[in-house]
Amino acid sequence: MCGIGGELRLDGGEPDLALMGRMLQRLARRGPDHEGVWSDGPLLFGHRRLSVIDLSDRSNQPMVDPELGLALVFNGAIYNYRELRRDLLARGYRFFSDGDTEVILKAYAEWGEQCVEHLIGMFAFALWNLRERSLFLARDRLGIKPLYYSHTPQAFRFASNSQALLAAPDADTALDPVALHHQLTLHAVIPAPRTILQGIRKLAPATTLTIDASGHERTSVYWTLRAMRPAEVRTETEWTEAVHTALRLAVRRRLDIADVPVGVLLSGGLDSSLLVALLAETGVRDLRTFSVGFEDQPEEKGSEFEYSDQVVARYQTRHHKYLIPNDQVLQRLPEAVTCMAEPMVGQDAVAFFLLAEQVSQAVKVVQSGQGADEVFGGYFWYPRMAAATGSDLERFRPHYFDRDHAEFLETVAPTWQGPDYTAELIAARLAEPDAEEYLDRVLRLDVTTLIVDDPVKRVDNMTMAWGLEARVPFLDHELVELAMQLPPALKIGGDGKYVLKKIARDLLPAAVIDRPKGYFPVPALKFVRGPFLEFMRDIVNSRACRERGLFQRAYLDKLLAEPEAHLTRLLGSKLWHAALLELWLQLNVDPGVRVNA
């Protein structure tokens, strides 16, 4: 796990080494163990390393293979790199390191741009072909690892976060009106290639991008997800056994490929608890688990310790739990926001940030349960959508959108008003082929699009802010392919995640399986009052916010008057959504306020 960055000059100029230094400063938290740069004519690579696989200097990056004429910067983990290495050795390739980075170089030499089809894992990488003078970028199938870029007539730049690209003096920081609509409608999900800023784009999952020194750019999608029943009929028992087997393999892959200890982020919910059980089932001993809790509000508890403690007791893990007071949450919120590559409103973002700070002092790698709800139908809105009538969009919108288009027009100033961009996007994604039933289309949309820029991005950003690598077994692409074949009843049945609950019956306490959905809650960001209300009031009433002119004042005043009366359909605070967006812009974009992240 690392932070990567690069610049390809398109105007005949030399890459800017000072700029790369500033970019690497903004990537430093992702890779505390080593910094490296390398250049070749118009191309400059930068890298910050978190040493997890092959801890020796031989796996430092940028990695160059003079014999093959290739250079690479890579962020992620390739879980099948040992098998690929054996295959490539048999094909005559020679290796000088023992990690997964060099395997990508050799795989590209052997298979060209199709090398990505051979990789199992999470990855974002850039590879420079010295002979062809072309740059090849790739992102993993489910977008677990981030990859941002900017393309101007002068230069093509890329990085693991947007802050690194904002280090360039010519960065275009104008707001993207289409992305703004998504930000305020899809609870901060802005699907690739857009971001909230006009001048920063991101590579879509399962996509490669090739650009040459003259600026010609070409993208290719190398994987698509089908959600169709297989030709052979399977019983419920057969489906359950198949999922159980695939889950064991996914968990084992993410345990074996590390030269450092691996822990589990244990929320007390079904997903993370099941990871602990599966690791124990595969023979892991001395398992390390980590939980975080916050202060209760009258409406909601701030910790799930009563459930995580039961899992710890059953499997005798080496457990660490942290209780964070509200004043510390409020104090640390701005720091967490400077580590967000894009503005993210999920209330557990700060929870992961503060938990990762503690966990990183004990381990470098953790497994986390993100993806289980989307892959296996765990959220409360899925059955509601399935029971609704009308077009696909009409069944989706009332249960998911944070605000309808009319309220969006009430929210933002006339400058930012336009068509219902989000409805257009979601309707088009739901209409894509190879999904058998309505719920298949919804879950595929969630897995391939919505989850990427909500929980998956949130966990990557907040853990990597402390040099902690989070691995997500529920997003193993082979497991996801299998899960998309399941009949919907085996997902949303039994209040959701039916097949996972069946697997868990012999592995976990019933109280953990049958409880309401668990996560790392921060109630103070949902039920906004007291110091949190004052904090958000100061942001939206600030001079910067007023001068930006993004929000209509009457709308903000309405939210401030009754913050707890204005929740989204997914029970998020609309005031927090507005305040978070403005705070992110102030801390990451506004001149003189920018903070290294």
Image (tube, rainbow, N blue to C red):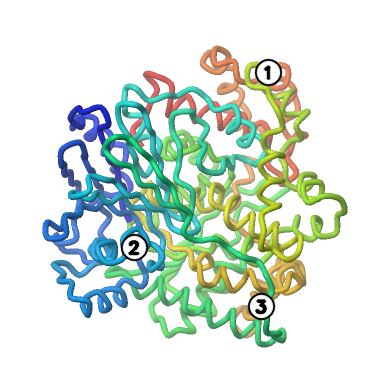
x 75%, y 58%: residue: 382
Label 3 to label 1: alpha-carbon separation: 51 Å
Q: Nearer the viewer, mark 1 or mark 2?
A: 1
* Residue 32: x %, y % from top left: 25, 49
**How many residues crowd around disc 2 within 10 Å: few (fewer than 14), some, or many (20 or more)?**
some
The CA span between labels 1 and 2 is: 46 Å
Nearer to us of marks 3 and 1 is 3
Indicate the position of residue 467 as horizontal and vertical percent values.
33, 52
Q: Secondary structure at mark 1?
A: loop
Res 370 visible: yes
Please tell me whether residue 143 is drawn above or below residue 261 in the rendered image.
Answer: above
The amino acid at mark 1 is: Gln
- Tell which of 539 and 320 is nearer to you: 539
Determine which residue is flagged by label 2.
363
Closer to the chain start, of discs 3 and 1, is: 3
Per the image, label 2 sits on a secondary structure element best described as loop
Tell which circle, 1 or 2, labels the residue nearer the N-terminal end.
2
Cβ–Cβ under 8 Å for marks 1 and 2 = no
Secondary structure category for the residue under label 3: loop
Residue position for label 1: 552
Residue at horizontal 57%, vertical 40%?
190
Write the residue at 76% across / 72% down: 489
Res. 230 mark: 3
The crowd level at tag 3 (other Cα within 10 Å; few <14, some 14-19, many 20+) is: few
